Image (spheres, coloured by chain):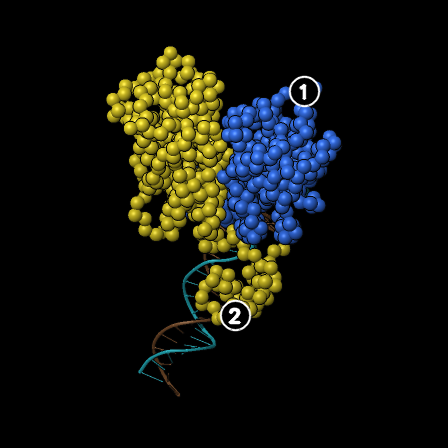
Chain colours: A yellow, B blue, C brown, D cyan
DNA sequence: TATATTTATGAAAACGCTTATGAAAACCAA
DNA sequence: TTGGTTTTCATAAGCGTTTTCATAAATATA
């Protein structure tokens, strides 16, 4: 039988209200009384029941996190940022994998709301009407991380994917390339998929390079798809001299496909990846990549959420974190 | 104001007990009544409050997971296994990073118990007396994953680290090597650190190869330490012809150190890693590695925990999952 | 000293649900 | 019909806190 606040009250010779005050650090308790209560707590090994507390106070100090796949290098880094800040603000995290399946996402939102989370962090790709519907019809504050809804209805933390892709492509242009291939993400992924593709197109256009459909492939963000799409590129009668991949794993696949065919990176073909996951340092040549600050996105999103949960004032509800390109050996120095 | 079970009861013209029965699938409800209640729930958009339910039923359908670092490839894979099975059994996961710091681990155990989790999954390295004390002094069932306490007091799911390291070393011996180096883990890590080292030593001994202290280095499981320790090996006047690393990241560091010095893997030096994380396929040459089934360890541990939470009978509380070596290009075919 | 304030404490009512307990209703056999 | 079962449901007592409200004690003010 676990010891309750009532047991402590009796042991200390006070009322449970007083024990509650002591436990919650309410200053209106005489020092002597506080000491007595603390002693009783110690003696009995009292451990407050957070569920009961949650029912009474309507706060659970728990936030729900819906994430596509925690085993992904990208999202696990993000999750770490989330959790660190959550801990800092005394929140715990209920972590759920959605696999980006809408039905599951909606169901998870519901489950987490049932569990009375104080806030919700949603990571994913596409935010559809149903998501918006589910997330705005509740009073529980929600922040999107590493994604955004099209109309910026919900608070979100991400980077400017369009500009990031533009910059990466431009860097390739600046190195004199005319035939720049892209391994894009799925088109139903509005940011990492579509936006990065748009940035690539715009950069080519601004450089006066005509778009060649042959040089555009769609991958699924996994290594394998980088490998296979690049093999196809290499089989072209006029293959690319540079490749921009929508994420690092595919970029590394590209490098290996190039190397496997006897060509050299960056000598024959230069490669730029995206996200700058830890992997980029563990490959030869090390991968030049657009830095997407995953940890920071998670951390900032969580911080933002705490503000909403505390009813603090928030100046800007859509935050775009800065990106930059980290140059490594998969690209050559810029020629000018 | 959220709608409560009471509102539903009024709307449906029944008592709240009946609503509760319907919500919880209690069969003792007339079909017609059930339909009325369901309709009322639908009409009002009722969403049961899991906190209140938890208080009344003393079950939260939530389990706590203490993990060293979710951003690690190794642990995030494990976490995925845990979460998948948890979902399957209708549990949610509260995920906490411990960074292997004992103080934090103990504090997390306490926090999770306050939150009234139905079970606890502990992942880490060393299980000390304090851990045992904290974990056994509660009635909340606990399972260790990817680790074990020395006396097998607590239920656990892991592999036979000694044997795994023995097998890896033996594989190198079978390839004719006499100078086999090991990049071990920290000695205060009893399994992945110490046990794997012991397995290595035993295999050498059984092969009649004398232990050479020069060929033993201690790393921290990160890529960098594989790189630096291997550089030191290569600087030896009599360098190793094979390297066994206690995990894959260090093994990949070793490969790159070897390649950077102009030597060839496996031509000049063969390398075996441990764990078989997804990375091993994303490196050239692809890394031969001892398969530790991370996902399965997580999944089995969670499954085991569900049994304890349901008071089911458990035959064996210490489960050792099988391991094997996956041969890739960082080792040569066995010569016989 | 008497009065007004402030500070400390306790009693008791929520919080939203589950779960005995037991009564009424429905069913059954004889 | 009658009595005995079985179903179906309502009443109400928790579950362990927080939090109002009231009051008592302590302190300050006049």
CA gap, disc 2 and disc 1: 79 Å
What is the number of the mark on residue A162? none
Judging by the rendered image, the residue that carries numbered circle 1 is: B335
Letter of the chain that mark 2 sits on in the rendering? A
Residue B329 is situated, as x and y percent measured from the top left of the image, at 57, 23
- Up-down relation of residue D19 to residue A191 (above or below): below
Q: Is residue B120 above or below residue A177?
A: below
Question: Which residue is rendered at x = 44% and y = 47% of the image?
Answer: A85
Q: For residue A252, what is the image quadrant?
A: top left
Residue that lies at the very extreme toward the front in this rendered image: B237
Query: Which of A151 and B91 lies nearest the eye of the viewer?
Result: A151
Q: Chain of mark 1?
A: B
Residue at image location 31% in from the left, 27% down from the top: A335
Q: Secondary structure at mark 1?
A: loop
Where does the image place residue A36, in percent across and percent down from the top left? Answer: 55, 69
The residue indicated by pointer 2 is A33
In the image, taking residue B315 as reference, residue A115 lies left or right, namely left
For the residue pair B156 and B5, the one nearer the viewer reads as B156
């Amino acid at each position: 039988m676990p010891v309750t606040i009532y047991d402590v009250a009796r042991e200390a010779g006070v009322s449970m209200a007083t024990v509650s005050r002591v436990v919650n650090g309410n200053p209106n308790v005489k020092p002597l009384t506080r000491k007595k209560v603390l002693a009783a707590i110690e003696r009995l090994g009292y451990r407050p029941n957070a569920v009961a507390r949650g029912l009474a106070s309507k706060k659970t100090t728990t936030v729900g996190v819906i994430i596509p796949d925690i085993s992904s290098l990208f999202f696990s880094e993000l999750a770490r940022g989330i959790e660190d800040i959550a801990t800092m603000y005394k929140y715990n995290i209920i972590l759920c994998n959605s696999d980006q399946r809408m039905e599951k996402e909606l169901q998870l939102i519901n489950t987490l709301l049932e569990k009375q989370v104080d806030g919700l962090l949603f990571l994913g790709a596409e935010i559809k009407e149903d998501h918006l519907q589910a997330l705005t019809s509740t009073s529980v504050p929600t922040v999107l991380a590493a994604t955004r809804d099209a109309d910026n209805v919900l608070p979100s933390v991400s980077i400017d994917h369009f500009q990031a892709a533009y910059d990466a492509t431009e860097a390739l242009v600046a190195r004199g390339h005319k035939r720049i291939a892209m391994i894009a993400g799925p088109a139903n992924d509005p940011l990492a998929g579509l936006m990065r593709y748009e940035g690539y197109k715009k950069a080519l256009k601004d450089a006066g390079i005509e778009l060649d459909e042959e040089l555009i492939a769609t991958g699924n963000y996994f290594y394998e798809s980088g490998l296979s799409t690049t093999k196809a590129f290499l089989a072209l009668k006029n293959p690319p001299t540079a490749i921009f991949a929508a994420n690092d794993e595919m970029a590394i696949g590209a490098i290996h496909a190039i190397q496997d065919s006897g060509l050299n990176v960056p000598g024959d073909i230069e490669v730029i990846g995206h996200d700058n996951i830890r992997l980029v340092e563990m490959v030869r040549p090390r991968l030049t990549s657009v830095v997407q600050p995953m940890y920071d996105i998670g951390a900032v999103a969580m911080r933002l959420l705490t503000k909403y949960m505390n009813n603090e004032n928030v100046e800007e509800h859509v935050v775009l974190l800065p990106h930059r390109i980290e140059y490594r050996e998969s690209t050559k120095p810029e020629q000018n």
